Amino acid sequence: MRRLLLLTIGFGAILWPGPLPDFARRGSALYHGRHALKGKIRGHDEFLPADAVRCANCHEAARGGQLGRLTAPRLDRSLLVDSRQRRGGPPSQYNRQSFCKLLRTGVDPASILIARQMPIYEMDEDQCTSLWIFLTGAQPDAKR
Protein backbone atom coordinates (compact mmCIF):
# COMPACT_ATOMS: atom_id res chain seq x y z
CA MET A 1 0.00 0.00 0.00
CA ARG A 2 1.36 3.41 -0.94
CA ARG A 3 1.69 5.89 1.91
CA LEU A 4 0.95 9.59 1.62
CA LEU A 5 2.91 12.06 3.69
CA LEU A 6 1.39 15.35 4.73
CA LEU A 7 3.95 18.15 4.64
CA THR A 8 3.10 21.30 6.51
CA ILE A 9 5.28 24.14 5.27
CA GLY A 10 4.54 27.76 6.08
CA PHE A 11 0.75 27.98 6.30
CA GLY A 12 0.04 25.34 3.67
CA ALA A 13 -0.06 21.59 3.38
CA ILE A 14 1.04 19.36 0.55
CA LEU A 15 0.32 15.66 0.11
CA TRP A 16 3.43 13.85 -1.04
CA PRO A 17 3.37 10.22 -2.23
CA GLY A 18 6.04 7.94 -0.79
CA PRO A 19 9.19 8.94 1.08
CA LEU A 20 10.24 12.56 1.48
CA PRO A 21 12.62 13.79 -1.21
CA ASP A 22 15.77 15.59 -0.19
CA PHE A 23 14.34 19.10 -0.53
CA ALA A 24 17.49 20.92 0.59
CA ARG A 25 19.70 19.06 -1.91
CA ARG A 26 17.26 19.76 -4.75
CA GLY A 27 16.93 23.39 -3.64
CA SER A 28 20.71 23.78 -3.79
CA ALA A 29 20.77 22.28 -7.28
CA LEU A 30 18.05 24.69 -8.42
CA TYR A 31 19.73 27.69 -6.77
CA HIS A 32 23.13 26.94 -8.33
CA GLY A 33 21.76 25.95 -11.74
CA ARG A 34 22.56 22.22 -11.60
CA HIS A 35 18.81 21.73 -12.19
CA ALA A 36 17.45 24.19 -14.73
CA LEU A 37 14.75 26.73 -13.90
CA LYS A 38 12.48 28.45 -16.42
CA GLY A 39 12.30 32.21 -16.04
CA LYS A 40 11.68 35.36 -18.00
CA ILE A 41 11.82 39.07 -17.38
CA ARG A 42 8.48 40.54 -16.30
CA GLY A 43 6.69 41.93 -19.35
CA HIS A 44 8.56 39.70 -21.84
CA ASP A 45 7.20 36.57 -23.49
CA GLU A 46 10.40 34.61 -24.14
CA PHE A 47 12.12 32.48 -21.54
CA LEU A 48 15.74 33.31 -20.78
CA PRO A 49 18.51 30.72 -21.17
CA ALA A 50 18.79 28.47 -18.09
CA ASP A 51 22.28 29.84 -17.33
CA ALA A 52 20.86 33.36 -17.12
CA VAL A 53 18.19 32.59 -14.51
CA ARG A 54 20.31 30.81 -11.89
CA CYS A 55 19.60 32.35 -8.50
CA ALA A 56 23.30 32.23 -7.62
CA ASN A 57 24.18 34.48 -10.58
CA CYS A 58 23.03 37.54 -8.65
CA HIS A 59 22.46 36.41 -5.08
CA GLU A 60 25.89 34.76 -4.70
CA ALA A 61 27.51 37.75 -6.41
CA ALA A 62 26.06 39.79 -3.54
CA ARG A 63 28.63 38.15 -1.26
CA GLY A 64 31.36 39.89 -3.22
CA GLY A 65 29.62 43.22 -3.68
CA GLN A 66 28.28 43.97 -7.15
CA LEU A 67 27.74 42.06 -10.36
CA GLY A 68 28.32 44.81 -12.88
CA ARG A 69 25.87 47.50 -11.75
CA LEU A 70 23.29 44.99 -10.48
CA THR A 71 23.21 44.02 -6.84
CA ALA A 72 20.92 41.50 -5.21
CA PRO A 73 20.58 40.66 -1.52
CA ARG A 74 22.42 37.67 -0.14
CA LEU A 75 19.64 35.21 0.58
CA ASP A 76 19.57 33.52 3.96
CA ARG A 77 17.08 32.57 6.66
CA SER A 78 17.27 35.93 8.45
CA LEU A 79 16.58 37.98 5.32
CA LEU A 80 13.55 35.88 4.45
CA VAL A 81 11.83 35.04 7.74
CA ASP A 82 12.68 37.96 10.05
CA SER A 83 10.23 40.85 9.91
CA ARG A 84 11.93 43.84 8.28
CA GLN A 85 11.20 46.92 6.24
CA ARG A 86 12.03 46.41 2.57
CA ARG A 87 12.48 49.15 -0.04
CA GLY A 88 10.73 51.74 2.12
CA GLY A 89 7.58 49.66 2.55
CA PRO A 90 5.98 48.40 5.75
CA PRO A 91 7.71 45.65 7.75
CA SER A 92 7.02 42.22 6.31
CA GLN A 93 8.42 38.72 6.28
CA TYR A 94 8.24 35.75 3.96
CA ASN A 95 6.67 32.38 4.48
CA ARG A 96 6.74 29.61 1.89
CA GLN A 97 3.60 30.84 0.13
CA SER A 98 4.72 34.46 -0.13
CA PHE A 99 8.19 33.34 -1.26
CA CYS A 100 6.62 31.24 -4.04
CA LYS A 101 4.32 34.13 -4.99
CA LEU A 102 7.36 36.41 -5.29
CA LEU A 103 9.17 33.96 -7.55
CA ARG A 104 6.12 33.46 -9.77
CA THR A 105 4.74 37.01 -9.92
CA GLY A 106 7.43 39.44 -8.76
CA VAL A 107 5.28 40.69 -5.85
CA ASP A 108 6.75 40.56 -2.33
CA PRO A 109 4.83 40.04 0.97
CA ALA A 110 4.23 43.80 1.31
CA SER A 111 2.67 43.85 -2.20
CA ILE A 112 5.67 45.69 -3.63
CA LEU A 113 7.00 44.75 -7.07
CA ILE A 114 10.60 43.56 -6.99
CA ALA A 115 13.24 44.90 -9.37
CA ARG A 116 12.46 44.10 -12.99
CA GLN A 117 15.90 42.49 -13.43
CA MET A 118 14.78 39.55 -11.26
CA PRO A 119 13.24 36.87 -13.46
CA ILE A 120 9.71 35.63 -12.94
CA TYR A 121 9.87 31.85 -12.67
CA GLU A 122 7.63 29.09 -13.93
CA MET A 123 8.03 26.46 -11.22
CA ASP A 124 6.01 23.78 -9.51
CA GLU A 125 5.34 23.47 -5.77
CA ASP A 126 8.15 20.94 -5.30
CA GLN A 127 10.73 23.25 -6.87
CA CYS A 128 9.57 26.25 -4.85
CA THR A 129 9.45 24.26 -1.60
CA SER A 130 12.93 22.91 -2.29
CA LEU A 131 14.33 26.42 -2.75
CA TRP A 132 12.55 27.62 0.41
CA ILE A 133 13.96 24.76 2.50
CA PHE A 134 17.46 25.23 1.04
CA LEU A 135 17.50 28.98 1.76
CA THR A 136 15.82 28.96 5.17
CA GLY A 137 16.87 25.61 6.60
CA ALA A 138 13.20 24.88 7.29
CA GLN A 139 12.30 21.29 8.07
CA PRO A 140 9.15 19.83 6.58
CA ASP A 141 6.87 18.23 9.18
CA ALA A 142 6.08 14.72 8.02
CA LYS A 143 3.00 13.04 9.45
CA ARG A 144 2.10 9.52 8.43
Image: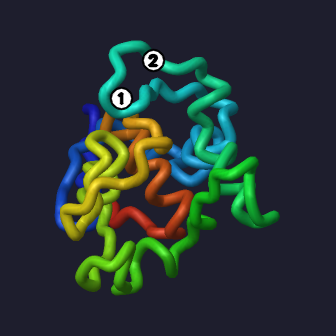
Q: Amino acid at mark 2?
A: Phe
Tell me if residue 48 comes above or below residue 123 in the rendering. above
**x and y percentages locating residue 88 in the rendered image:** 33, 79
Q: Measured from the top left, where is residue 13 in percent x and y?
A: 19, 55
Which residue does the numbered mark 2 point to in the structure image?
47
> SS for tag 2?
loop
19 vs 64, nearest the viewer: 64
Relative depth, front residue between 57 and 19:
57
| In this view, the mark in front (2 or 1) | 2
What is the CA distance from the residue labelled 2 to the residue labelled 1? 9 Å
Q: Nearer the viewer, residue 121 or 115?
A: 115
Q: Locate residue 101, reporting x and y percent.
A: 26, 50
Counting residues from the N terminus, which is met first, the one under dot 2 or under dot 1?
Answer: 2
Residue 59 place in picture, x, y as percent: 63, 55
Residue under circle 1?
A: 122
| Quadrant (top left, top right, bottom left, bottom right) of the C terminus | bottom left
